[in-house]
Image: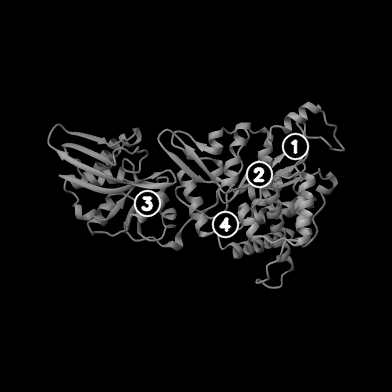
Amino acid sequence: MISKICSAIPYGFTGHLIEVEGDLNRGLPSFNIVGMANKTISEARERVRSAITNSGFFFPSYKVTINLAPADLNKDGSYLDLPIALSILILSKQLLLKDIKNRLFVGELSLDGKLKPIKGIINIVEAARDAGIEEIYLPSANLPQATLIKGPKIYGVSTLQSLFLHLKGQKLIDLPSTSETPLESPNLSSGQTLLDHIRGQQLAKRAIEIAVAGHHNILISGPPGAGKTLLAKAAASLLPPLSSEEKIAVTKIYSIANLSTAKAITSRPFRNPHHTASPASIIGGGASATPGEISLAHSGILFLDELPEFPRQVLEALRQPLEDKTISVSRANQKVTYPADFMLIATMNPCPCGYLGDPTHECTCTSQQIQSYRKKLSGPLFDRIDMFVNVDKVDNTELIKNPPENNHKHNVVKNTITGGILKQYLRYKKPGFFNSSLSSYQVSKLIKLTPAAEKLLAGASEKLNLSARSYFKIIKVARTIADLEAVENATHDSAPETSVDTQHIAEALSFRSPT
């Protein structure tokens, strides 16, 4: 007798259907799993055997062979425990083939028959939906993420025994209520800093406002204690909520990385890796080509504190994803492309000791040390940063003064940013598409400059010897500045589209010169 059960596994940023075939023959009792199964799946033999017996079923005393098709696909993880157990129940005639027809099963079994959550559940549900499968059975803990995908009926299973009773029609499992979906925010505890908490630094606050509104990459330079890190953390609190599509993409990445398997993510990520992090942890990779920090920051902020302290290899690897908004991780057995559409906020000191140009501290660095320090950041990397801002240390006497009463600048800025993002959505008709996302061709087609603005930019381009990429970045930053100005001056939501004028270009140019 042959049993066939439909299942699936995550495969890169997608999912792949797996057919779990079972065969039972007379002979010495044995339990074998074939079909390019790695050690984790091979160990499923002991988990499944214990789960079956401890759930009140009997394990057949025959030769049991399980094949995982397609046999030429590498399979990893504990996703197939549940379908393997069901296959054995069918082979031993405790279940019938009709009980599992047109249904997909996935999940890890504990020794007592309970189902544990698995990573990459959204990949699996998407693969099942695309294959036309109408019913999916998975661990209950995975329901909040799985139900983000609309279409198939998704059942949360707590134990092997409860699933058996449901399939036999004796005690049905209820479909989940979407109103009970738990939510979580990934690594956003550091994003609670508000602009109102930062004294002084008005120019830097303005730069952060522009950068967040247009999703522009920004480098903040200044001495220690000037508030560079606080400004980056304040930016996280200015971000708008995720759209439905972005919520699915971010949750999917975190699930694949095994950082969140139980809850759906609704807040934009704020990733802050240390400069000692390995290239694979930043870019992505490892034996199973897992996503790195740049993908975990997708639709959010990647904060690189003390940028020159990162290895040159890591910094140069950022160039391609900063441009393409994706990263391809290649390994011997697979190639995976992950999204990496993040906003880069980086900080650096003006010199190794940090006090170059500081009126209260003498710089102890030699000119060679300063030159070597700045050379850690290549010209092509600088070219991919939209905005540069220098900050000075705030006088200590200003730090302890009480802020003005009824100071709502943070809320005002956040509302202005929200309005600027709305204008970009109305212009481009794409959620999560910002002025910084425009290609050079799109800039020339979609952004209008006044004749005076064109003249000013042409003169500045020649004087500053700007590259083509820098030229277009100035236009995109100026477009964001114009959007924010239109929001501040608008009396209603349907304010007419404004052209980019000289004051917008001039302000964008003021944020262009690197340190």
Q: Residue at x 17, y 45 (%)?
A: 2
What is the secondary structure assignment of the residue under circle 2?
loop
Q: Residue at x 17, y 33 (%)?
A: 29
Mark toward the viewer: 4 or 1: 4
The label shown at residue 432 is: 4
Q: Give how far across and how far down residue 287 sits, in percent.
A: 44, 33
Q: Disc 2 residue type?
A: Arg
State the quadrant of the C terminus.
Answer: top right
Q: Residue at x 64, y 43 (%)?
A: 303
Label 3: few (<14), some (14–19) or many (≥20) C-alpha neighbours in 10 Å: many
What is the secondary structure assignment of the residue under circle 4?
loop
What is the C-alpha distance between the residues marked 2 and 1?
19 Å
Q: Earlier in the sequence, mark 3 or mark 1?
A: 3
Q: Which residue is mark 2?
A: 384
Label 1: few (<14), some (14–19) or many (≥20) C-alpha neighbours in 10 Å: many
Q: Give how far across and how far down residue 290 sits, in percent.
A: 47, 39
Q: Disc 3 residue type?
A: Ala
Q: Disc 4 residue type?
A: Gly
Q: Earlier in the sequence, mark 3 or mark 4?
A: 3
Q: Give how far across and how far down residue 275 sits, in percent.
A: 63, 34
